[in-house]
Image (spheres, grey):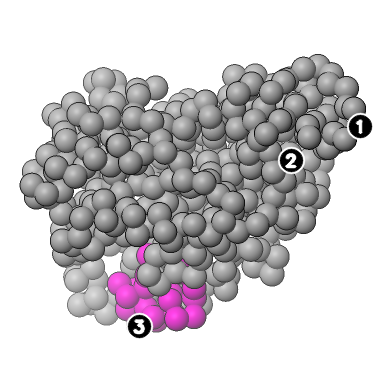
Amino acid sequence: MRTIIRNGTVATSADVFKADIQIINGVVTAISERIVPVEGDHVIEATDQYVFPGGIDVHTHLAFPGTVDDFESGTKAAASGGITSIINFTDPKKGQSVLDNLREWQEKAKPSFIDYGFHSIINECNERVLEEVPDLAEQGVTSIKLFMAYKDHLMVNDVEMYKLMKTAGEAGIITNVHAENGDVIDQLISDALSKGNTTPYFHASTRPCLLEAEATGRALAIAEAANAPVYIVHVSCAEALQQVEQAKKRGVQAYAETCPQYLVLDSSYLAKPFEESAKYVCSPPLRDKSNQTVLWNGLASGLISTVASDHSSIPFEGGKALGRDNFAKIPNGCPGIEDIFSLIYHFGVHEGRISLQKFVEITSSAPAKLFGLYPKKGTIAIGSDADLVVLDPRLSRVISKNTQSQSTDYNLYEGTKVQGVITYVLSRGEELVQEGRFLGKPGRGEFLHRKRFKKI
């Protein structure tokens, strides 16, 4: 049976045009000015609506300890919000084989509604790990992540980072880096607590922009020395983005990501009463509002390649509330997988900060290209997977925890009115969302065996 999406306005990273789309066996097989349905065809009417490639969220933390979204609830939330593929991080145990850890996470992901891949977090560097990293690429995992913060659990030092980046780069693997100067941050936290400064506001003041910028610059310099590609996750401020810009000018294979919380929210949320402010604790922290314009301009210019959610579904009760008397005990992380597509469309396209083509680029095409999924994912083209989102720009909705699928007991964007409502979501041609109703079945998602990194 054919599925035909009729009379929609198709948007890709290169063009916007009116066309019909034909889907057979989960793949786009024709794009034409007019495709005439015949008996037995399934027709989706998209008059006056946009048809986008499905969103690709390349920064998620589903099924992590302390979170409430596993791969079933988390990917239902993702699909409900227009995300049709994710790349989730693994959570390593020191001393464990990197490949064994990957296999554990592949088992955890089996209930997924949508297609999924992995970034392997590496939290130690020894001969065994260095030997295993190239084997990840053979398993379809062509990205790793390193941390410059969270000592004794995740953090690697500069020499270890160099060795891991060099090994990864030679194997066609791109390195994600969480860039904050963990050593100095730990001292600033100790200093703040010793003075009785315990509220969430001090989470931000102990993780200043200059320490994100310093670590970003250091990571980029190490990647340059290793001649390896590097992807700086969750860039939050102008100073860090300036380091990315300078590295790109030097010819470093450098790419940057930001997140909706840094584009839409600001540090004033951390000054609210604890019951509210604790919900907004993430790292890097929310910044002064002036950084928002710099980040949006970075997206528009291409200096920032992608937007990702950094979804970490830490509840308030039993989670964020643990830090009531000590901000350092508040688990870091924000939920957002369900609303990222709508937020970037509303605040980006609807409010005139980015074009439709740029919207597609940062939410779908660039993630697919950077992480070895293009053109199977990330575009609307003959032969590509029919991962598609139909959005009606005439409609609006109000974001609320009362209507969300993600499992947290709050929503960071509670009460925010966004223009544009998703009416259909298709994953490999199968309708997961139909006129606002969720139809997907758990376990239908497939593991994404990704190609090795290629410079874009």
Callout in the foreground (3, 2): 2
Q: Earlier in the sequence, mark 2 or mark 1?
A: 1
Where in the figure is residue 427, as x and y percent of width and height?
64, 42
- The foreground one among 259 and 203 is 259
Q: Indicate the secondary structure of the residue bearing disc 2.
A: strand
Q: Is residue 193 left or right of residue 414?
A: left
Of the numbered discs 3 and 2, the one sitting upstream in the chain is 3
- Above or below 398: residue 432: above
Return the residue at label 2.
391
Q: Which of the 4 image quarters holds residue 414?
A: bottom right
Neighbor class of circle 1 (other Cα within 10 Å; few <14, some 14-19, many 20+) is few
Q: Amino acid at mark 3?
A: Asp
The residue wearing badge 3 is 325
Image location of residue 453, percent across then percent down: 34, 29
- Quadrant in the picture for residue 390: top right
Magenta segment includes 322 = yes
Q: Give neighbour class at mark 3: few <14, some 14-19, many 20+ (Cα, 10 Å).
A: some
First reached walking from the N terminus: tag 1 or tag 3: 1
- Residue at the spot x=71%, y=30% of the render? 24
* Start-end of magenta stretch: 313-332
Q: CA distance from mark 3 to mark 2?
A: 44 Å
Which amino acid type is marked by label 1?
A: Glu
Q: Secondary structure at mark 1?
A: loop
In whole angstroms, how far apart are the C-alphas of marks 1 and 3? Answer: 66 Å
> Does residue 346 appear to the left or right of 304 in the view shown?
right
Q: Is residue 351 visible?
A: no
